[in-house]
Amino acid sequence: MEGYVKKELVKELKNVSKRMLDEPELVKKLFYYSAAYGAVDRTMRYGFTKQLLMAHTILNVTYNAYKERLRAIAGGDAVVPLTIGQLDRTAELVRDLGDAFNKGIDVNGILADIMLLAYMSTGPGHYLNENGAFEGLI
């Protein structure tokens, strides 16, 4: 990834993170989160890498998982929660993702944690979380 393109991606991911962390409402946090995969998608058009593709895919899939959980909760299925803590930690990881891209370091660990946070919003993930499988993630 070249200078200007990298700089813009990092700036956008940090902005997404800040807006998510500043926002108190889950629905709006999720709205801002949707910009993360969009920024990565635009970046891939100027400088494709496998790490960008993986980041785009994981950010997109996790956004949709969170969106589905919010829909289910709005429909009365609140057994599996979606918490502010999950989305705030996701926001911090989006910031870390920007830092990793900026420094040219591996992003797999960050992306794995983003996936785990979203997995916690599923039935099996919530069950595992209640049994301590994701201790220390949030």
Image (spheres, grey):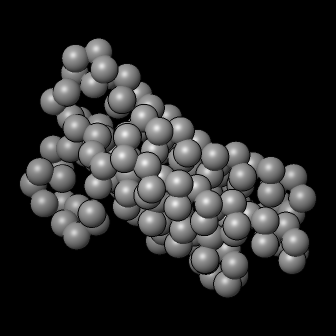
Q: Quadrant of residue 54?
A: bottom right
125 versus 131 height, above or below: above
Task: Kindly tell me whether residue 119 is visible in this rendering.
Answer: yes
Identity of the residue drawn at 18% across and 53% down: 129
Identity of the residue drawn at 42% across and 35% down: 27
Residue that lies at the very extreme toward the top in this rendered image:
75
Identity of the residue drawn at 74% across and 64% down: 9
Give x and y (percent) for residue 18: 52, 61
Q: How many labels sit on residues? A: 0
7 versus 120 height, above or below: below
For the C terminus, the quadrant is bottom left
73 versus 48 height, above or below: above
Give x and y (percent) for residue 49: 77, 64
Give x and y (percent) for residue 84: 30, 49
Give x and y (percent) for residue 125: 25, 45
Observer-nearest of 128 and 8? 8
For the N terminus, the quadrant is bottom right
Task: Kindly tell me whether residue 112 is visible in this rendering.
Answer: no
- Answer with left or right where residue 15 lies relative to residue 121: right
Identity of the residue drawn at 23% across and 61% down: 134
- Answer with left or right where residue 76 lies relative to residue 12: left
